[in-house]
Amino acid sequence: MTDFALNRHIHGLNVPHVRLGEYPTPIEHLPALGDVWLKREDLSSPVYGGNKIRTLETLFADARAGGIKRVWTLGAYGSNQAVACILHARRLGLQPGAVLFPQRATPAGAENLRVSLGECADVKTLRSIASFPLHWLALHRAHGREAYLVPPGGANPLGALGHVANALEIAEQLNAGAMPTPEHLVVAIGSTCTTAGLLVGLPLAKQLGLWPGELPKLHAVRVTPWPVTARSQVLRLARATAKYLHEIGGPEVKVDPKLLVLNTRHFGWGYARVTRDGLAAAARFRALGAPPLDTTYAAKSGAALLKFTHGPTLFWCTKSSAALPDVPDAKLAHAPAFIRRWLRRAEQTATA
């Protein structure tokens, strides 16, 4: 029996998939916050977890099916996607590479950048995001069909199918008594891939007779700027994902815009910019012995969570809890001088 929920529940469907994670990720009650449960995506892999893993499972499978041995991804200096791509690609015999653009200097960003630089020989660090489109185009021209280019956050219909499957996984857990049927889901929205996948997966679970009760509101808490996380963009990817699922043999699924609640109140002054409410949420989770909230993503959705309690709520723990590889300074000697300066500045930045 397949361990990919979409293939398991839809007869005849065969979505390309490689298993990188350990599923189902647990649902755990956080009683100190009342009706709050945690979807422990942070535990999705002991190598490197978080919500990015589900996306890479379908995209890497697609690369392997095409006989491609090299995968490139892109993101900010402190990208979780880049770390996940680099560490997991090697498990499948794929050769990773990354193009990274500047972000606000933070300790969390520095941790990830050290891993990307120390664990991958092909990391291109840019001085300005303005030059990114030219570098990405150059990759297309240089590698053509010899490399698989993973979009930001894996945000395309195939990548989003991993999160469609997660909605079915959650429905199975609800039926097993993991928690009451949630009225609200709370997740950070960056590339839109997770949110778009859930917007397809929730009505699909209901359509398949798996979801008990009414569908929840999906509170997507913005951590990247407009227009990346514009409501129209989220719905566009969700509808494209539903269309793609139907084209490859799945049922027709109608995306309901009313399920999406786009929360823009905790973005702060920009991507990776630490917010006071985010720091408070991270400190509260620490005090409760809950999973860590990184200041770029989950701390902002955590801040939104703490602002409301309206019945059973499921919160996404999106930041990996796995220990990062230790990267000595000697492994960073090849990095450009401006990157070493950025790392020093980031590592000295206080976030509390």
Image (tube, rainbow, N blue to C red):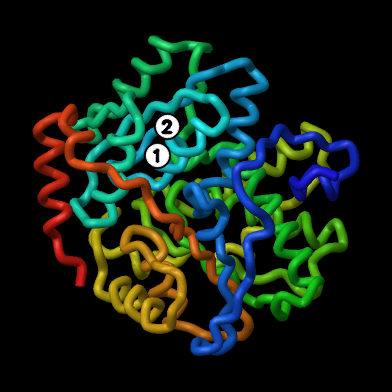
Identify the residue at image location x=56%, y=39%: 56
Query: In the picture shown, does residue 114 fall above or below 262?
Result: above
Image coords of residue 256 (percent x, y): 68, 58
Image coords of residue 274 (percent x, y): 25, 64
Q: Which of the pair 173/332 is nearer the observer?
A: 332
Q: Residue furthest right?
A: 11
Image coords of residue 345 (percent x, y): 11, 51
Q: Which of the pair 51/240 is nearer the observer?
A: 51
The secondary structure type at the circle numbered 2 is strand
Query: In the picture shown, does residue 335 fall above or below 181?
Result: above
Rendered image: mark on residue 73? 2
Identify the residue at image location x=16%, y=52%: 346
The disc labelled 2 sits on which kind of residue? Thr
Q: Could you tell me which quadrant the C terminus lies in? A: bottom left
Task: List the residue tagged with mark 1.
Answer: 82
Image coords of residue 61 (percent x, y): 64, 30
Q: Which of the pair 57/196 is nearer the observer?
A: 57
The secondary structure type at the circle numbered 1 is helix
